[in-house]
Image (cartoon, grey):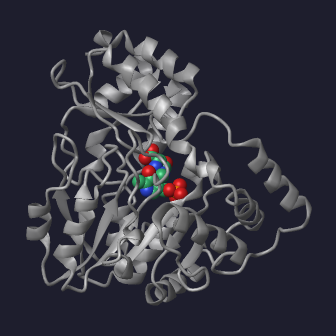
Amino acid sequence: MPIQSKLPHIGTTIFTVMSKLATDESAINLSQGFPGFGADPILLELVGNYTREGYNQYAPMAGISELRTALAEKTRITQGYYPSPEHEVTIVSGATEAIFCAVSALVRKDDEVIVLEPAYDSYEPAITLNGGIPVYVSLNSADFSVDWEKVKSAITSKTRAIMVNSPHNPSGFVWSQSDLDTLEELIRDREIYVISDEVYEHITFDGLRHLSLGGHSGLRNRSFVCGSFGKTFHVTGWKIGYCIAPAALTVEFRKVHQYVTFSTVTPIQYALAEYLKISDRYLSIPGFYQKKRDLFAEGLAETGLKLISSHGSFFQLASYGHLSQKSDRILAVEMTKILKVACIPISVFYSNQQDDKIIRFCFAKTDQQLLEAIKRLGELNKIL
Ligand code: PMP
Ligand code: GLN
């Protein structure tokens, strides 16, 4: 008997669709965002050791204290504040879970939640499932910066929260201090909370530093900061992340987390706690990815596509409207089938599916894969 869907408008995510097509077509997969290279063997060995030593039963609901403490220390080093490991840090099964739990803890029926779009695809279903109403505000089309006047006019007495994502997926835009200050000014006198998706916190370029909302004294007291070890340490399949939020918000967050999943994979928590002790392991990531961005962007520019500068994340946007009026979805499929390079059409990140003729490539791949993809894209005129 069919059930009445709570998410009638939702199908299978574009990431699943394009990754499957890439596999079926034996294409280089620059669509779904995951690294094409392995993690540090030291980290892998730590996980092996902890599993063999018997750390295989349920972890404490909020995460092991060693990892919460190591994360608080990382936050002190990178953002200049030390969240309480006991009351403000929770280890979860990936940033997706952190976002879902934060939204569930906050959003009540008919509450409005501001979503800046293009937006990562998990925000809207989380809001909708909790009875909330997403209120969309478009980012500036040239560089995906925030139009604060538009945000201001979207705020109403029903606004409960705003979803923030910097470094931004898909555009690579990185928020500045003035963005944080402006947001703080806009919501200062209102009961509006922030869910800050910071999964690319360690991937910024050109000397830009990621500014966590938790590091802002006026925003910290109302923000859920969501992060992902999968992105930071090239292990997206481990699905482990965290939420840092003030004690009162963490109490509510954990009420949801304990019934969504209860706790998160134990041996990996121990391994990460140990691995995080050497700060260079995360502080060296921007340099590592900047080389990949430069290699890929330089080659991609030769293909005739127009690049939109990526300042963070492991994504590069490229527009092709000056070359063809084909829809971005069709172009992405043809690129995968004919040129054997998979990408993501950007229209999927918009609530109205607007097609600005922009595609997204993930450059978290080996240099060899990137160079081969660029070579194949040299034949772009075949599909335009
Ligand atoms: N937010 C954004 C912007 C992402 O790109 C991703 C990565 N897929 C996530 C959240 C989810 O992270 P995780 O895999 O840790 O759930
Ligand atoms: N965040 C990844 C991306 O944007 C995908 C994660 C997923 O498949 N859900 O490509």
Above/below status of 83 relative to 350: below
The one of 44 and 204 positioned closer to us in this rendering: 204
Examine the image and state in which quarter residue 356 appears.
Answer: top left
Above/below status of 65 relative to 318: below
Drawn side of residue 318 relative to residue 137, left or right: right
Above/below status of 68 relative to 321: below
Examine the image and state in which quarter residue 300 appears.
Answer: top left
Drawn side of residue 168 relative to residue 53, left or right: left
Q: Residue furthest right?
A: 53
What residue do we see at 37% from left, 10% from top?
Answer: 378
The one of 373 and 223 positioned closer to us in this rendering: 223
What residue do we see at 18% from left, 44% from top?
Answer: 354
Can you see residue 5?
A: no
Above/below status of 15 relative to 222: above
Residue 107 x/y as whole percent = 33, 81
Quadrant of the frame with the C terminus:
top left
The one of 293 and 141 positioned closer to us in this rendering: 293
What residue do we see at 67% from left, 59% from top?
Answer: 276
Residue 55 x/y as whole percent = 84, 68
Residue 199 x/y as whole percent = 47, 56
Can you see residue 104?
A: yes
The one of 100 and 92 positioned closer to us in this rendering: 92
Residue 351 x/y as whole percent = 23, 54
Drawn side of residue 235 relative to residue 338, left or right: right
